[in-house]
Amino acid sequence: MRWLTVVLSLAYPLLVLAGLKWLDPRILGPLVLLFVVGRVVSSRQGGAFRQPVLVLPALVLLVLWIGITSVFNDARGLFVMPALINAVLLVTFAQSLFRPPSLVETLARLRVADLSPAEVSYCRAVTRVWCAFFALNGGVIVWLACAASAEQWALYTGCVSYLIIGALFGAEFVYRHYRFRRYVGSPADPLLKRFFPPRETS
């Protein structure tokens, strides 16, 4: 079931665009709320509530936002939802910069425990890059929700933004291997070693 909820989450823009053809925002909004709350509750064993300081306020904000959307029956409230998610991610990543280790460093240490000072600094830089992305991406989504058509919003939010995320992941992955030449057994290691051979150590 987890893979299904992931697919539905990624397809949110397209599902909202399709749902608005048959349902009013005041009806579709509560359905979205039920899905999000169910998603959070079902993932509690995976650590969703390990940071209640972030999760609970986000849920309260979501409930209030869906309530406003339903009262005014305005589809733009549903269009802004992905921007709220970007805001939560921005706060999560930014908070780790002020309370080290950075989130990227925490993820990196799941595979490599002995990070060098240069790698720790690099992880902080990557965390800042993601903060910038979430801020810009959220801003674009809000602008599209207010000033563009539903189709344009869905195209960017459900396709273009994912392509940008994939490009960022890919570029960072390649650059990291170019810079540090550290190989930890990923499927791409044999190919990357041809382009970026491990540095010899004495």
Image (cartoon, rainbow, N blue to C red):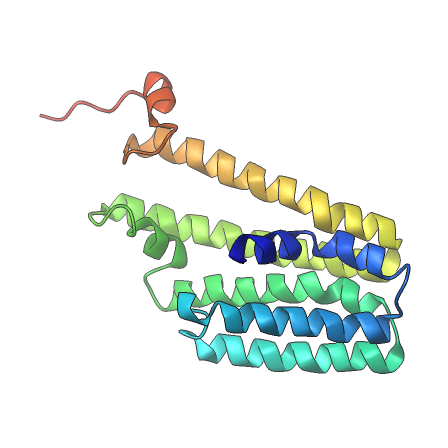
Q: Position of residue 123 (x, y in %)?
A: 37, 49
Report whether 185 appears left or right of 159: left
Residue at point 52% right, 74% down? 41
Q: Is residue 114 above or below residue 68?
A: above
The N terminus is located in which quarter?
Answer: bottom right
The x, y position of residue 147, in whole percent, is 87, 58
In this picture, is 31 found above or below 22? below
| Whole-percent x, y for residue 118 in the image | 28, 44
Q: Is 165 left, or right, of 125 in this rendering?
A: right
Q: Nearer the viewer, residue 165 or 40?
A: 40
Q: Residue at x 54, y 62 (%)?
A: 89
Give the residue displayed 46% in from the left and 70% down from the top. 48
Relative to 24, is 101 on the left or the right?
left
Total marks in image: 0
Q: Residue furthest top?
A: 194
Taking the view exactly as shown, the residue that stands out farthest to the left is 202
Residue 45 quadrant:
bottom left
57 sits left or right of 118 in the view: right
- Name the spot of residue 184 as percent of width and height, x first: 27, 36
